[in-house]
Image (tube, helix red, strand yellow):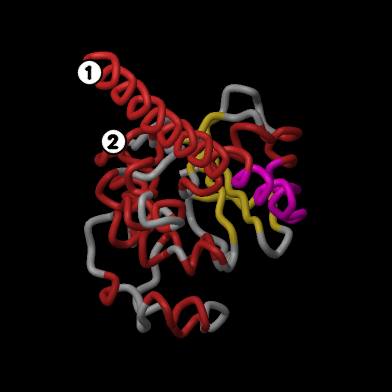
Amino acid sequence: MARKIILGLVIVFLVVFLVFLGMWLDFNETQRVAVMNWLASDQKLRDGFLWIAENTASGVRVLAWWDYADGILEISHRDVVIREASREIKWTIAGMHKYPWSWIEYELWYPFEPDEKVRDVGRFFIAEDTSAAVEIAKKYGADYVFVVYPDDITKFYAIVVAGGKQPDEYLEKTEGEIIKMVEQRAIIKKETIGTRLIYGDETAGFEKVFDNGRVRIYKIVG
């Protein structure tokens, strides 16, 4: 009897172990391989990452929304202000919605950024004047800003929420409508430093040093 109980427990342990091993492997596939394949396969994105690698000093830090951090770290070989999302905006992580159980993977293994840091990056993008944005950038030692058009407009809903504000203060449309109408600037209700940089506008305090129509990189000079 005791031997059967022990055997049963061993089988249960092995099943649980294999389940969690499979979840861990899936999580790492999503986190590293899939993300890097996406970043590296988009030539204009890759050109932006390579520009940073070839035209900036090795010790610089780049402020960008967290989706592009792996490309900046792995292709540009430069530091970033944030690499991942925070718990406050974990619902914006696409991988969490991959399977019904994906949230378990993220709760167990995702390296969430501190809420304050992601909140500050959100506030950088929704700042309405140069001094407020530059103050945040300097707080984290950022030298450059990396934005992607039109992708960062589709992400602006999440960026606004991360900054602690209501999206309808800044956007005319809902999140789903933004994706469909992203190239119509009329969807922006309130212009901010972030929207100006994403759309490629000349902006006080920021010198545009790279623009291929999709990736825009600015040196912080303010």
> Which amino acid lies under the numbered mark 1 shown in the image of this protein?
Met
Q: Which residues are magenta?
A: 34-49
On the image, numbered disc 1 is attached to which residue? 1
Front one among 89 and 108: 108
Closer to viewer: mark 1 or mark 2: 1
- Crowd rating for badge 1 (residues with CA inside 10 Å; few <14, some 14–19, many 20+): few
- How many numbered marks are there? 2
Front one among 195 and 179: 179
- Mark 1–mark 2 Cα distance, whole angstroms, equals 51 Å
Horizontal relation, residue 2 to residue 207: left or right: left
Magenta stretch contains residue 35: yes
Q: Pinpoint residue 180: horizontal percent, then vertical percent.
A: 52, 82
Q: Pinpoint residue 159: horizontal percent, then vertical percent.
A: 37, 58
Say if residue 179 shows up in the picture. Answer: yes
Q: Secondary structure at mark 1?
A: loop
Front one among 63 and 98: 98
Horizontal relation, residue 164 to residue 201: left or right: left
Residue that extends furthest to the top in the rendered view of this protein: 3
On the image, numbered disc 2 is attached to which residue? 114
Whether residue 99 is situated above or below residue 188 in the rendered picture: above
Q: Pinpoint residue 41: horizontal percent, then vertical percent.
A: 74, 51
Horizontal relation, residue 139 to residue 214: left or right: left
Determine whether label 1 and label 2 are within 8 Å by CB.
Answer: no
Q: Pinpoint residue 15: horizontal percent, then vertical percent.
A: 40, 32
Q: Main secondary structure of the magenta part?
A: helix
Residue that extends furthest to the front in the rendered view of this protein: 1
| Point 64% across, 28% down: residue | 77
